[in-house]
Amino acid sequence: MRRFAIGCAALVVGTLLIPGVVAVTIAQDESSWMRVDILQVLPRELDDFIEMQLEEVNPALQRAGVPWRSAWRTAEFGNTYERLFVTPMESLAELDFGGPLARVLEPDRLARIADRVRRTLSSRQSYAVRYRPDLSVESDDVSGLSLAWITSVQVAPGRTADWEAFLLENLPRFQGADVVFGVYERVWGPGPSVWQIVENHASFGELDRPTILQRTFGERADEVASRLAGVLLSVERSVLRYDPELSFSAAVP
């Protein structure tokens, strides 16, 4: 198991699974593709939304063989009624057949469920995100890490190779500094091309720690960051909290 959420969120994007040891894991060994759905729930419909996820959506996904689904919510700062779900995809080809729900639900029932869920939302955004293990620093220690610190960066057009080269070149330094993070690439979906760097933490107090660059390069952090001028157009930080009620994993009976 890997020590990141996303999937954050956005990260990204991820993560997205079960209480306890693997609660903040959203990237799995078998597939690097994940679907990320960011939902804005109408406050008056929150109870109905949760009921639908627990009684209809999650059981259907499990019957379809989806191994896990990771749910996240805004942690203190942001839209209180935003929910983020991450599920793995065997490949993008599964979407040609309507996705996992279409495999186990009759068309009429699927339409009724989709309509009822739609009535609980004010908006919905969906993304295809790819986990990049070649650019990440992993750890098996995931116990109690229920907060995901997500740094979303927008890479300038034509500079993706420079961004990847920076991460790859400095992986030994990151590993030597004992920093752990997952890198997720948002490939398909609305908005600009975004990469998400996800760290997991047990408390808000841990968010006072220096950034990855500061922990890795110390006094040279500003100098190193200047190398990314022109490569990165924007940087945005957010914090998500794992939602065990709306998550599931086949690893638990």
Image (cartoon, helix red, strand yellow):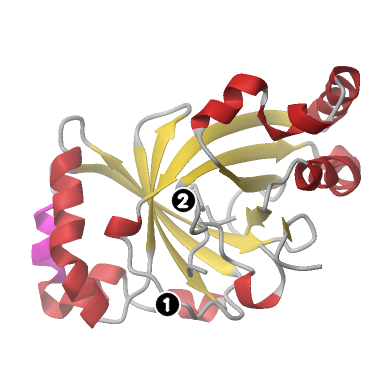
The image shows residue 199, relative to residue 155, as above or below, that is below
Give coordinates of residue 15: x percent, y percent: 54, 56
Q: Would you say residue 50 sits in the magenta stretch?
A: no
The numbered mark at residue 139 is none
Secondary element at tag 1: helix
Q: Amino acid at mark 1?
A: Asp
Q: Is residue 5 left or right of residue 100?
A: left
Say which residue label 1 marks: 208
Looking at the image, which is closer to me, 118 or 74?
118
The image shows residue 90, relative to residue 204, as above or below, that is above
Looking at the image, which is closer to me, 133 or 144?
133
How far separated are the C-alphas under marks 2 and 1? Answer: 20 Å
What count of labels does the image hold? 2
Say which residue label 2 marks: 11
Q: Is residue 113 left or right of residue 94?
A: right
Between disc 2 and disc 1, whose residue precedes?
2
Q: Is residue 86 left or right of residue 179?
A: right
Rendering quarter of residue 161 = top left
Q: Would you say residue 226 sits in the magenta stretch?
A: yes
Q: Residue at x 42, y 76 (%)?
A: 139
Magenta region: which residues? 221-228
Q: Amino acid at mark 2?
A: Leu
Crowd class of label 1 (few under 14; some 14 to 19; many from 20; radius 10 Å): few
Q: Residue at x 84, y 26 (%)?
A: 119
Give coordinates of residue 150: x percent, y percent: 45, 57
Image quadrant holding the C terminus, namely: bottom right
Secondary element at tag 2: loop
